[in-house]
Amino acid sequence: MRTIRKWGVAAATMSAVVTAAGCGSGDTSGHADAQHVSGTVTVFAAASLTETFGELGKQFEAAHPGVEVVFSFGASSALAEQINQGAPADVFASAAPKNMQQVRDKGSVTATPVTFVRNRLEIAVPKGNPGHITGLADFGRTEPKVALCAQQVPCGAAAETVFRTAGITPRPDTREQDVKAVLTKVTLGEVDAALVYRTDVEAAGGKVEGIDFPESAEAINDYPIAPLAHAPNAAAAAAFVEFVTSEKAEPVFAAAGFDTP
């Protein structure tokens, strides 16, 4: 069962909050013993982690009866802003070290963040590639309709790096606030191409096609995770971070197309 809510945080982009419930297989080891963890753990996570964290949330709940995992997914920059404005959360998982550093600079994170996965960009096109996109150079042409992430969010910053490396000035028809919104433009056929993460192409299944390009190696995103300094449920926060960074989580990330650090 899943429920969706919105956090009322001023001056920030609101993110859907998903309660990951149900059953699954999984276990944890070390300090996070099931009898020591209870209550709700609220995790603010990058939009590109939606599918993997949804699955890991089920596994964590199965390993810790009585624990409810609540996710708020969105652009890492917006989530960092919400955290620094006092949004009640226990864990932050960012798609870029820069946004994690923003919350560290404000004292919202005092533990050392751990890089748990890496991701890279891929060109996404609608099924059948109706725009006949062949590579990154097409983003500098006027003919195809293309979508990019806003420059302040991790997928947008990574896109700027690859365009700069390739010497291409992009001509986006739209810039979206997170990578899932960009992907939606492709799945709906509203654009001919977009830059999203490889994992988002995987998650879309047969709805889109992916095109690799060599410049993506110049902008690999590290994903750090850390419990928040003022976590309402510090024990559950530590346990969730431990679970995500454990070997038990690796198959879920690998199946989604993430790279290991």
Image (cartoon, helix red, strand yellow):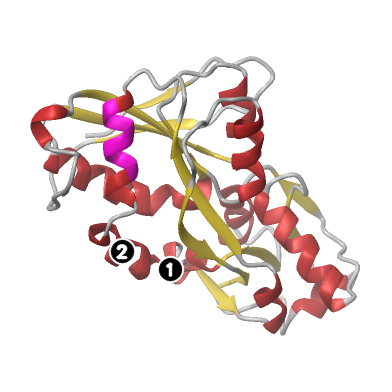
N-term mark: 1 or 2: 2
Q: Amino acid at mark 2?
A: Glu
In percent of width and height, residue 196 lies at 61, 62
Q: Position of residue 191 (x, y in %)?
A: 70, 62
| Magenta-tinted stretch | 235-241
> From the viewer's perspective, is 184 left or right of 241?
right
Q: Say which element carries label 1.
A: loop
Q: Residue at x 52, y 45 (%)?
A: 46
Q: Is residue 2 magenta?
A: no
What residue does disc 2 label? Answer: 250
Which residue is at a point 78% across and 49% down the rendered structure image?
Answer: 151
Position of residue 138 measured from the top left corner of the image (x, y, whole percent): 81, 77
For badge 1, the amino acid type reads Thr
- Per the model, the C-alpha gap separating discs 1 and 2 is 8 Å
- Compared to residue 223, the image places residue 125 above or below, namely below
* Residue contact at pointers 1 and 2, CB within 8 angstroms: yes
Q: Characterize the magenta stretch by its predominant secondary structure.
A: helix
Q: Is residue 104 visible?
A: yes
Foreground: 188 or 64? 64
Magenta-drawn stretch contains 239: yes
| Location of residue 77 by image quarter | top right
Pointer 1 residue: 260
Q: Quadrant of the N terminus?
A: top left
Residue in view at x 65 percent, y 76 percent = 217
* Disc 1 packing (10 Å; few <14; some 14–19; many ≥20): few
